Image: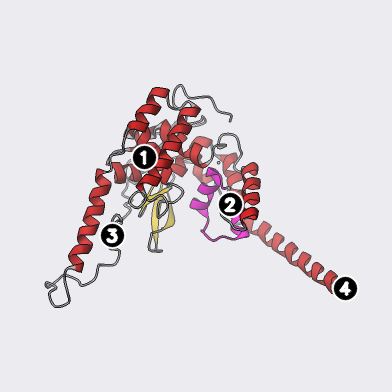
Amino acid sequence: MKLKKYLLWGAGLCAIYAVYVVVSLFFVPPVTVLKDKKMNMTIQVKDWQGNYHPLVVGPKNRYWTPLSQIPSEMKWAVILAEDASFYKHEGIDVKAIKEAIKYDLEKQSFARGASTITQQVAKNLFLSREKTLTRKAKELYLAKRMEQEITKGRIIELYLNVIELGPMVHGIGHGARYYFGKSPAALTPRECAFLAAMLPGPRVAYNPYKNLDKVLKRSNMILRLLANKGVLSSGEYQAALAEMPNIGRMQKKVDESIKQVEVMANHTSATVPQGLATEPEKGQAEPGAPPAEQHPAAAEPAPEKPQEGAAPAKEGAPAQDKQ
């Protein structure tokens, strides 16, 4: 009798929660605003110290890069590495979800996710980072709505302009300049694969300042995927493998960071020159890591309207079936 009572209570609570989730979906932001290429919106992003900062998404961000100015190798690198079924699914990859659930049950953890690129865009633009069933339900709903309202090209454009690639480094425009000192359009296939390789964990696991070999190894895998897909010819693939990313800018930042820390460490409280703090300023970079950059969002003229409605493959790449 008690068991039946508990089951009824459980069913009642589940029903109430289901109603709450359904009602909450009526209050999610409309995705139709994303159709406008001149649209600008401000989202909150968290820095590596846990503080939130505003980030402009749209042409008013000085690093904003329209789809037409992003190399096809960059587009395909993130698609093949992060969401290989991007041009086949309608926002949700059911097969990937089933595989993730099976894997997590076997490992008894939440080690594997199954978010599509479309889901990640929905989360980054409209939702918090809380890990709850309600937020996940909103994410799935928004992903489906985005696939209905905007093109795949617009989705990948938004994704590539908000991805995290370093300490307050968001978007391919900022990432290309931060690491290689060039515009995204000038990136080589190796550099495209290098940036895509960082996406699973730019803060620790795939931080090139800490785990360069790991990033290079993953970028080799991405280059192989590009070759298998036909995005790179055999010759281009071999040339990309032979290329070593110019990490001079990265090493310079590391050296400057270490030098700053050493200067501070060489002074005692009795010998600190006037005006020199005895401890690093708030936000001072740690040894072996780059100093954080403040993300600018200065206004610039709106870019030319990028081409939409087709998979971002370069000329000669294989045709795709329709994140």
Give how far apart the Cα atoms at labels 4 and 2 are. Answer: 39 Å
At label 2, the amino acid type is Glu
Dot in front, 3 or 4? 3
Q: Which residue is mark 3?
A: 287
Q: Are marks 3 and 4 in contact (CB under 8 Å)?
A: no
Residue type beneath disc 4: Met
Residue indicated by mark 4:
1
Give the image quarter of residue 256: bottom left
> Could you give the CA–CA distance between mark 1 and mark 3, rounded to whole angstroms?
39 Å
Residue at point 51%, 24% (across, down):
318
Q: Is residue 60 visible?
A: no
Point out the tag, 4 or 1, that comes first from the N-terminus.
Answer: 4
Q: Look at the numbered discs 1 and 2 and tell me whether their residues touch, using CB distance below 8 Å.
A: no
Which structural element holds mark 3? loop
Q: Which residues are magenta?
A: 115-136
Task: Write down the residue under mark 2.
Answer: 139
Which one is earlier in the sequence, the residue at label 3 or at label 2? 2
As for residue 120 lying within the magenta part, the answer is yes
**Sequence-first tag of 1 and 3:** 3
Residue 175 visible (yes or no): yes
Q: CA distance from mark 4 to mark 1?
A: 68 Å
Between tags 4 and 2, which lies in front? 4
Q: Is residue 205 a member of the stretch shown in magenta?
A: no
Image disc number at residue 81? none
**Mark 1 belongs to which amino acid?**
Ala
Mark linked to residue 302: 1
Q: Nearer the viewer, residue 242 or 300?
A: 242
Residue 129: where, in percent of width, then height?
Answer: 51, 58
Which quadrant holds residue 67? Answer: top left
